[in-house]
Image (cartoon, rainbow, N blue to C red):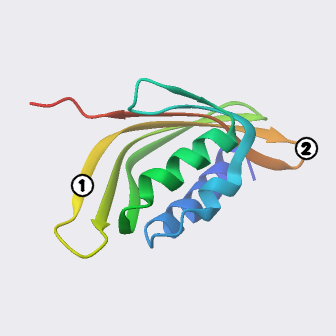
Amino acid sequence: MSSKEEVQQINEQVLAAAGKGDFMPFLNLLDDEVEVFDHLAYLFDGKRDFVEYMQGAMAGEESATYAFHQPSFRAITDTAVVVNAYDRIATIPKGGGPAKVRCGRATWVYARKGKDWKIASVHFSPMPKD
């Protein structure tokens, strides 16, 4: 199996779980030294900082789901694969209420670390307002 196919398979498993509200496969794939550029004007430098942010951001939510649309997979080398996609996160607040849906763009860079694939870099950006 090519590196592109391996990452495609891993990514599909991560997104299948996220589509059911389980973000642990995504968090487990993050490299300890991941850099995350989120829609905030802030660089999360390391897995610990980003996980703390995610836990705080999700604390007021009853549930959340995440999905990719039109993903593109590009193998740069045998040890690096870039995934670009339009993304969508939907959250339901604790206590009920309408879902809050946010759409944007995402780039995940996978790097092979030994035999394992890890997400080394992530960039999320919101879609521009009309």
Q: Quadrant of residue 101?
A: bottom left
Provide residue 113's location: percent of width, then percent of height: 85, 41
Judge left or right: residue 1 versus residue 126: right
Tag 1 secondary structure: strand
Query: Within 10 Å of the Cα at label 2, are there few (<14), some (14-19), or many (20+) other Cα atoms?
Result: few
How many tags in the picture? 2
Q: Which residue in the structure is indicated by mark 2?
A: 114
Q: Residue reaching furthest left?
A: 130
Provide residue 43's location: percent of width, then percent of height: 54, 25
Provide residue 115's location: percent of width, then percent of height: 88, 49
Q: Amino acid at mark 2?
A: Gly
Provide residue 59's location: percent of width, then percent of height: 44, 61
Question: Relative to residue 62, is residue 33 depicted above or below?
Answer: above
Question: Relative to residue 58, is residue 126 depicted above or below?
Answer: above
Judge left or right: residue 111 versus residue 14: right
Judge left or right: residue 115 versus residue 45: right
Q: Quadrant of residue 24?
A: bottom right
- Of residue 101 and residue 56, the one placed in the foreground of this image is 56
